[in-house]
Image: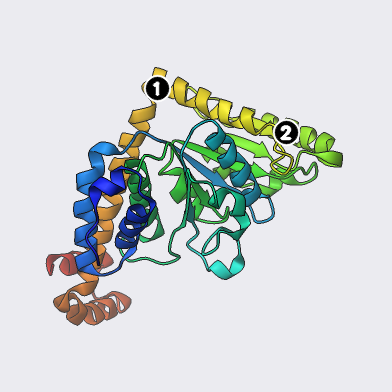
Amino acid sequence: MPTIDLDLLTAGNRRALAKAITLVESKLDTHREQAQQVLEQILPKTGKSIRIGISGIPGVGKSTFIEAFGRHLIAQGKKVAVLAVDPSSPLRGGSILGDKTRMEELSREENAFIRPSPSEGALGGVAQKTRETMLLCEAAGYDVILVETVGVGQSEYEVAAMVDFFLVLMIPNAGDELQGIKRGIMELADALVINKADGESINLANRTKSHYQNAFHLIKHGSFWNPRVETCSALEKERIGDIWEMICEYQQLALDNSAFYEKRSRQNSEWLNKLIHEMIELRLKQSQSVQEQMPGLQQAVIDNRVTPYSAAKQIVALV
């Protein structure tokens, strides 16, 4: 693995950034150690971006929205990085994994950087790779980090735990849309944005907006921000600027209420705890003595000769 030129990286050189991300994504222990050294050196230059999570089910127009949103931000003088999180198979086509063709215009922009996360990883999994890639992009001078997730399963919670603002894209649907969205996602979302609000769907989108606004009133968020419901048309590039203004308003309110950096500190602390648990679990699995003792203790628990607590205590004591 070639040495990472930190001066080039922090100057915004895309090749140096791509090399650093490849290092972070490597599963080799030597590369992981080298990656951590790079990350520690660039830490003082991180944290200056706004991190935005974008989720939505397949077919909601996520790629079209991200492209329109990203190009709007670039027109405002911002540098934009797009990262994808999808712990499932790339064959499902739910996110931008492995191909930039669905964001062709954005990928050609000099001030845009698009990078999928690997669909598998060692310690920390996809979320760790994305968190570390996000730090590298910030060090390279990207002002806005967009983290995309496919919008089903655990990935939504992982993304919400690493961003400042979590946006969920919806489609106009006045029927069973409230049954179709998980309550947990409603609690995570800082905003619901109903895409495809154009043509004959405008009235439907407005009715959907009203339904979701009513639903939000039933959920206590208990913070300085009341989650909002907006409509837009990514295809027609309508109301994209309103979405950005809403996010800027959120950021300013969060800073005014000392909530912005408190949230980041809390996320870092929770991530530390998660990594400690994973490292302990990994050490247990790699321990020769644990591998030797485990089958006997498992059988003893099954046979009711030893309590699960006692067996677990003996296993932990072996490390």
| Residue 69, image x, y percentages | 59, 39
User: What is the quadrant of residue 226 in the picture?
Assistant: top right
Callout 1: SS: helix
Say which residue appears at 45% left-offset and 65% top-offset. 119
Asked whether residue 269 appears in the rendered view, the answer is yes
For residue 307, side relative to residue 77 (left or right): left
| Residue 37, image x, y percentages | 19, 53
Q: Is residue 126 above or below residue 170?
A: below
Callout 2: SS: helix
Could you say which disc has been placed on residue 209 in the image? 2
Sequence-earlier tag: 1 or 2: 2
| Residue 154, image x, y percentages | 49, 55
User: What is the quadrant of residue 102 in the picture?
Assistant: bottom right
Say which residue appears at 41% left-offset and 67% top-offset. 120
Say which residue appears at 30% left-offset and 42% top-offset. 268
Residue toward you, 60 or 2? 2
> In the rendered image, which residue does mark 1 sit on?
255
For residue 93, side relative to residue 311 (left or right): right
User: What is the quadrant of residue 4 in the picture?
Assistant: bottom left
Q: CA distance from mark 1 to mark 2?
A: 28 Å
Say which residue appears at 54% left-offset and 67% top-offset. 90
Asked whether residue 310 appears in the rendered view, the answer is no
Could you say which disc has been placed on residue 7 in the image? none
Q: Amino acid at mark 2?
A: Lys
Q: Please, which residue is most extreme toward the right here?
A: 200
